[in-house]
Image (tube, rainbow, N blue to C red):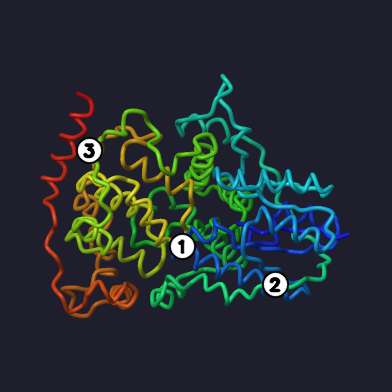
Amino acid sequence: MTAIWWIRRDFRLCDNPALVAAALAGDVLPVFIRDETVDALGAAPKWRMGLGLAHLMERIEATGGRVVLRAGDARVIIPALAREVGATCVHWARLYDKDAIARDTEVKSTLKSMGIDAHSHGGHLLFEPWTVATKTGGYYKVYSPFWRAVKETDIAPCLSAPKVRWAEAPQSDALADWALGAQMRRGAAIVEPHCHVGEAAAMARLETFVAAHADVYQERRDFPSEPVCSGLSENLTYGEISPRTIWHAGMGALKAGARGAEHFLKEVTWREFAYHLLYNEPELAHKNHREGWDTFAWSEDADSADVTAWKQGRTGIRFVDAAMREMYVTGTMHNRARMIVASYLTKHLMVHWRVGRAWFEACLIDWDPAANAMGWQWVAGCGPDASPYFRIFNPDGQLEKFDKEGVYVRRWIAEGQRAPSSTALSYFEAVPKAWGVSAQGLYPKPIIDLKVGRERALAAYSERNA
């Protein structure tokens, strides 16, 4: 019998419930579909998805299998492919945004009407969103009680990679023909050396974190020049490592006495909370979480001079600019820096969080629909746990606190340095030539005085509550 494994964001062989179930059911045919959800991705995440998919395909081919690639509507392709190969069942890992849920529900209904078993599985999260509820049966809107509700939960052990009999593969598209990285253009060559692609790379990252950084994670995680964070958000995004694998490693570090391990587990759970909200609030990525914010005086002009300066990392505010340049060179950004650039955009510049969310969606290789939406709303003031909502990070004050020696700034800003670092110079090779930026140019003056921006934002908050 043939069992289809529909690959989505589970680019791994270990701890993959959908793959295990398919392997138990018969000869496995792995399938990846480039549908509208893939085509809608921004330049960086689509390119990075292509790298991860290519790596997984190589691993499967090394064991005698072949991934079938098809482009089009999954609601049509999956049933047609099942009929073509005589599949008796289809297995996949669940996703939790409204478009994926609608698509998967229709696929499951169609398959069942054809007499083909269809099964969705967990694996992308630790806790299915509907399994965590308040005492009144609702969902959690604040993180702290969510953490208390799940922190003592027994997490099932990880599954080993199954022994798989691969099915004979029918006609397939060629991955190169999809050109998933076309929109990255010259930036791809700059970002790729900073990527950690695949299951083995993810496990190596986790092992390094536990051995070298878990102990000091809580006290040093906010210092952007120090390699204390795990970097696993990139791999979690594409399912190159499971959250269960990370959780059990974190718990092991905690039991071994690592001082920062519990805080690390809280960050893993923050991602779970984001999906808990996205599932229960399907419009979270586009609409304000809190009521009363739809009339707030944010600008939604994504092409204004201020927003353009922010996008280019040329605001004249060093922490903000260093962070944006880090993103263009590495495809990621330090978590503390993400808060600073988001606060500066939504508060000092009074620009809507949706503008920033969309830009991150285009530029981050670790873009995640739930974490990105919740993170932007949290900083903007209209999201969950955004208390006090009027908190405004001072980028210069944050720099003094977390980069006092200027290591992070020098790493990413070349202008004014006699001998700029290679990372700072890489920014000019990564960004579009149309920006017209040069390492020999002058560093820009601030586009807005921080005090003026802060006072303007506080006035808007006061007016909102008047």
In the rendered image, the quadrant that contains the N terminus is: bottom right
Relative to 242, say whether 419 is above or below.
below
Q: Nearer the viewer, mark 1 or mark 2?
A: 2
Looking at the rendered structure, the kind of residue marked 2 is Ser
Q: Secondary structure at mark 2?
A: loop
Examine the rendering and report whether any part of residue 351 can be seen: yes
Q: Which residue is mark 3?
A: 297
Image quarter of the C terminus: top left
| Nearer to the camera, 243 or 225 | 243
Q: Nearer the viewer, residue 211 or 408?
A: 408
- Answer few, some or many: residues within 10 Å of disc 2's Cα (few below 14, many 20 plus, some between 14 and 19): some
Side (left or right) of 143 relative to 72: left
Amino acid identity at mark 3: Ala
| Dot 3 crowding, Cα within 10 Å, few <14, some 14–19, many 20+ | some
The front one of 353 and 203 is 353
Q: Is residue 319 visible?
A: no
Give the Cα distance between marks 1 and 2. Answer: 26 Å
Q: Mark 1 or mark 2, which has the lower sequence index?
A: 2
- Under mark 1, the amino acid is Ile
Which residue carries the number 1 mark?
365
Give the vertical position of 312 relative to 387 (above or below): below
SS for tag 3?
Answer: loop
Pointer 3 or 1: first along the chain = 3
The residue tagged 2 is 172
Q: Position of residue 364 (x, y in %)?
A: 42, 60
Q: For numbered disc 1, what is the local secondary structure?
A: loop
Residue 59 appears left or right of 149: right
